[in-house]
Amino acid sequence: MPDIGFYHPIVIHFAIGLLAAGVLFRWMSLTGRAACAGPAAASLSLLATVAILVAAQSGEDAHVAVEAVPGAARAVRAHQQWGERTRNLAVAVGALELLALAFRGRPSSRRLAFASAGVGLAAFLAILETGKLGGELVYVHAGGVGIRSGDPDDVARLLLAGLYQEAELDEKAGRTTDAASLLEIAAQRFPADPVVQVRAAEALLEDRNDPAGALEILGRLGPIPEEPRLRFRRGWLTADA
């Protein structure tokens, strides 16, 4: 089976939407006030079951690279466990909906509809928790960000973002020397990025009081024709150094 981990964020959004709509229509159908609610609930719930099965498989494919990130394994396992619970509940909803269709017109059909509504609500709550844990995995542990594709350019962007954000935090905490060191690393790793070079020169000049180092970085910069603000900052720093 092909690796579909790349599509996990897309599929899971469809799964959440379909499941939410299916559960809503199923509860509406129990009131007996909307004739179309029952067929809509069955269709949406079955589509949601398929989407959740695909989402579960894509999640399995996606978690391999993420689990290798230091400190992320526990978060990956928690997300995976809730994903499996959601998948099992979704399969139960799909089975109940199929049984309700098979026994349509019989007294047991309504009992099956009630059961589907209850299990569907549990599945919806489970998928919300799964999504919450997935968000923490991405935004707290950088799970998948820049590493999923294995493309060196993607990993480089992740590295640059980490260096820049950590430098910003160091500056706010008063660790200006550490911030300058991180930005100096960024300047070395990304010599073709004028924004990085100017920011690193600024840190060396203002945080480390190293005008010679700042001038060395600024001197390596070529023309910056399309960035007037950056040209101004470069000139200002050069004059200040």
Image (cartoon, rainbow, N blue to C red):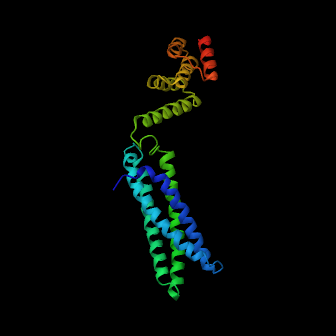
Considering every residue shown, the one lying at the far left of the view is 1
Considering every residue shown, the one lying at the far right of the view is 33
Q: Percent position (x, y) of residue 114? A: 54, 79
Q: Percent position (x, y) of residue 210? A: 53, 14
Q: Percent position (x, y) of residue 179? A: 52, 26
In the picture, the quarter occupied by the N terminus is bottom left
| Residue 152 relative to residue 163: left or right | left
Task: Identify the residue at horizontal 47%, vertical 36% (top origin).
Answer: 158
Q: Looking at the picture, does residue 98 appear above or below residue 149?
A: below
Quick one: 240 or 45, which is closer to the camera? 45
Total marks shown come to: 0
Quick one: 190 or 118, which is closer to the camera? 190
| Residue 134 relative to residue 27: left or right | left
Q: Looking at the picture, does residue 29 appear above or below residue 58?
A: below
In the picture, the quarter occupied by the C terminus is top right
Task: Identify the residue at horizontal 59%, vertical 70% (top origin).
Answer: 24
Task: Identify the residue at horizontal 35%, vertical 53% (top origin).
Answer: 2
Q: Percent position (x, y) of residue 44? A: 53, 68
Q: Looking at the picture, does residue 67 appear above or below residue 81?
A: above
Task: Identify the residue at horizontal 42%, vertical 57% (top origin).
Answer: 80
